[in-house]
Amino acid sequence: MTKRHSKELMRVSEEVKTVSKKNISKADFPVFEKYKDLVYLDNSATQQKPRQVLERVEKYYREENANPLRGLYDLSVKATDAYENSREKVREFIGANTTKEIIFTRNASESLNLIAYSWGRANIESGDEILVAISEHHSDLLPWQLLAKEKGAEIKYLDCDKYGEYTADDLKKALTPKTKIFAIAQISNVFGRVNPIKEFAKICHDNGTLIVCDGAQSVPHIPVDVNDLDVDFLAFSGHKMLAPMGIGVLYGREELLEKMPPFLSGGEMIEYVTREGATYAELPHKFEAGTVNVGGAVGLAAAIDYINDLGFEAIEKRENELTELAFNEMKKIPYVNIIGSEKAEDHHGILTFTIEGVHPHDVAAIFDADNIAIRAGHHCAQPLHQHLGVQSTTRMSLAFYNDEQDIKRFIETLKTIRRRMGYDR
Amino acid sequence: MTDNFYGEVLADHNLHPLHRHELPCATHVCKGLNPTCGDDIELHLDIHDGVITDGSFTGLGCAISQASADIMLELIIGKTPDEARYYASLFHKMIEGKITDEELEELEEAGALQNVLKMPARVKCAMLSWNTMEKLLNGGDS
């Protein structure tokens, strides 16, 4: 670390101290001890894990592990407590009314599939309409496409402009008396822009339409309150917010979840089984068949503690500063084209771009050669790329634990790419 | 200049491909697709009396896939389909790291793609045109 760099870090830490219980510290992340030269800018794909989360998961497996929810002995009770306390932590984090509304899944994709399979197959009929925002990740698009095909329903898309903006007017025009549900991410994984979910929820509800919010890119970065937003469903993944892979969350309004049939069947989701049929367990266990991922759940709870200790104010401040720094430097390079808004503050740590004349895979390969991890391709949003008229793009996505040095290295490499591809000589 | 990321040969074939154009007279056309990255090419071959008399490619892709296609066409134009298949088998051997020095010599400029071995994520890019050629010769698309 250079002297100047450590000074910069100290300066940021001083500022952050006033609003947080804990300072932002890259040293909390063991991956950067192992790979000292790594610049990790693929945080929208998955985030690195702090020691506090890793240690909590290990403690669970060392000291509290048993099959939860059915054991009649002390260790199983410990496992059950660890699991249910994590659920309460998640409830509080997103402002849900009751833990009955918090279903643990594997990830946001599974949460969204659960809605489409369970709510969708019970409520969507031939001739109904499903409205999906064009920038949706495939995991919030394919389940609805499959559902529409199966039921003879119609899938419609809400288009955004080239800055990634959706308007209330467009939404109002797209909704019809037949629109049963609207699916949209709070933050697009390509644009980084925050969609006005609260306003859209009101418009949907006035039309008798439910709203599903994909929170995979928003819950890790901004405060999300399901009651304030008034969404019917919210899905997010643990691994994009410091927690282990394989734990995700579905929030659903209690009265909707009550009426929905189970998604998967098996152990721990039944009340009583006979040869003819079964009655199902109460919420939330109705939707959690089989032995659950307690290690993942306690890891997610530890990640929430970590985020709460830093505070969203500090996290957002840091991420916005770094976004602005990268954005302004990228704007200075004439052959770099940033996808979406022309204002740094609309990007929330996500900068998707193209380089004139260089394919994104070659861009990613050159970054990789310089030990900088970024993403290239269509980012699981092919319909959006078709809508924008680009085949594929490159994306850098940052998190609060990145620093100015990471951005500097990113920009330095970015400036060399055309030359290293044989241009301009 | 030596700081070319992929080396001069690949950079040159990517930026100034000889065979990247339409070929309306082609007797055979075949599409190749890398579903994971969305790269797609269309390979056009003109085959008369058992000889590949001309060939071209169109479509979009990264530098490795474009250069590989261009170099491949350079090698197989004027050859028989069986010779083209033989070069494809050599190319496979090279990517698998099993090629001899003599065989590598036979591949001429295609040998510049040997370094793809060190980039496992890019093997599919280098293979795209070769796989498409084999598919075409085995009766695919047209």
Image (cartoon, grey):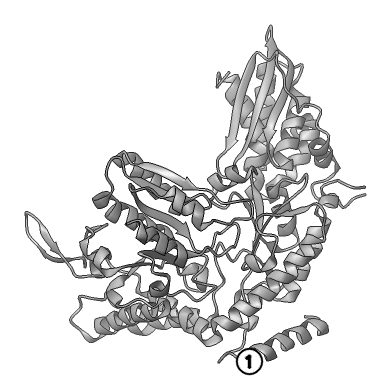
Left/right of residue A418 with respect to residue A284 in the rendered view: right
Given residues A90 and A337, the one toward you in this image is A337
Is A230 situated above or below A17?
Answer: above
Residue at 85% from the left image edge and 46% from the top image edge:
A422
Which residue does the numbered mark 1 point to in the structure image? A17
Given residues B49 and A172, the one toward you in this image is A172
Residue at 9% from the left image edge and 56% from the top image edge:
A277
Left/right of residue B11 with respect to residue A292 in the rendered view: right
Left/right of residue A254 with respect to residue B141 in the rendered view: left
Specify the quadrant of the image occupied by residue A387. top right
Q: Is residue A400 visible?
A: yes
Given residues A359 and A163, the one toward you in this image is A163
Q: In the rendering, at what x and y percent does residue A369 appear? A: 74, 58
Q: Chain of mark 1?
A: A
Q: What amino acid type should be assigned to the residue bearing mark 1?
A: Lys
Q: In the rendering, at what x and y percent does residue A242 appear? A: 52, 74
